[in-house]
Image (cartoon, helix red, strand yellow):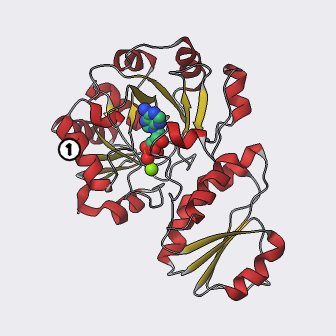
Amino acid sequence: MAEVIEVGEGNGAEAIARAVEVLAGGGLVALPTETVYGLAACADDERAVARIFAAKGRPSHNPLIVHVPDVGAARAVAGTWPAAADRMARAFWPGPVTLVVPRGASVVAAVAAGGPTVALRAPASAITLAILRRLGRPVAAPSANRSQGVSPTRAEHVVSSLGARVDLVIDAGPCAVGLESAVVDVSREPARLLRPGTVDLEQLRAVLPELVPYDGAGDAQRSSPGQDRRHYAPAARLSLVESVDLADAARRAPGPTGLLLLDARPDLPVAWSQVLGRDPRHYASGLFAALWAADAAGCRSLIVELPPRSPAWSAVLDRLQRAAAPG
Ligand code: AMP
Ligand code: MG
């Protein structure tokens, strides 16, 4: 099993030192961020990067996000630093917005799936920022789970998904945001949203008005190789169902059946249920933990009440649609 350090009041310095030691030695460290736990390795170390792909079972055509502590470190990693990148980074970093920019020489080709660009982000986690600063090297970190599975928002998700495939887990409690970052390609003009996140289109366009919206159906998928249709899927068969059809769906689904709801439905007797409510931020922060819990409860079917189709819900809807895609 992996070594786990629970970060508490007194042991921050020890956790930082140990994480830096393992990363510098070519190891894999699960790091907390505000989005999900990341599986980190030095992005300038070819063997360490290869270990990330192997541990996740991730196809080599799916590029990794490189984590940096600040704009200065990002500029050092990028081949060129577009004006749009600078505006976005200054507005949203540290935070859940990833910027695709031309790739510099320090990042190994495998991180970028051999492509000419690299995705960069400064995560809003005090302990992870401290680790990145102390290490002084760029760190590649995709979500710390097996490929296509549910992303980890708690340290125990990492341990149950990756086990001994990860050397060290830094446990800083549940992730506050709970969904992966928005990915914005600023390497081309006009800039384009490749993956929706909890910072929504309106907020991104307040800084970059020319930004082209996310097109889940086609464009974004072709230009962002990792955007597989099926992703974030629990073991339970997930279906997205309108509120009025819940009772019917619950009756027909092969059990044990779980329900993921916007509002409580005591009239529906099922093996497992959870209410995530109608606030999209609160819903996002609890979604992946609910998918993990439904699996742990042994659900064979998981019926998810369809959230409103409004911009505030776009990141949640994107993840739910991928989780429901046939395997
Ligand atoms: P993950 O770290 O597991 O959340 O996945 C990162 C995602 O970011 C990938 O699946 C890609 O869709 C996207 N991405 C990473 N690097 C690039 C890049 N250079 N160009 C376009 N998209 C990227
Ligand atoms: Mg992932």
The residue singled out by tag 1 in the image is 27
Q: Is residue 2 visible?
A: no
Quarter of the rendered structure image containing ligand 1? top left
User: In front: 267, or 323?
Assistant: 323
Image spot of residue 230 (x, y percent): 51, 59
Residue in view at x 45 percent, y 18 percent: 71
- Please tell me in which quadrant of the rendered image residue 312 appears: top right
Q: Is residue 281 above or below residue 247?
A: above
Image spot of residue 179 (x, y percent): 56, 48
Residue in view at x 61 percent, y 33 percent: 193
- Please tell me in which quadrant of the rendered image residue 17 appears: top left
- The answer to whether residue 275 is left or right of residue 79 is right
- The answer to whether residue 123 is left or right of residue 4 is right
Q: Is residue 196 visible?
A: yes
Residue in view at x 66 percent, y 25 percent: 211
Image spot of residue 258 (x, y percent): 62, 78
- The answer to whether residue 74 is left or right of residue 94 is left
User: In front: 80, or 280?
Assistant: 80
Image spot of residue 284 (x, y percent): 63, 52
Farthest residue to the right: give it: 244
Q: Quadrant of the N terminus?
A: bottom left
Q: Is residue 146 above or below residue 110?
A: below
Number of other residues with Cα within 10 Å of mark 1, as a class: few under 14, some 14 to 19, many 20 or more = many
Mark 1 lies on a secondary structure that is loop
Note whether ligand 1 is within 8 Å of mark 1.
no
- Name which residue type carries label 1: Gly
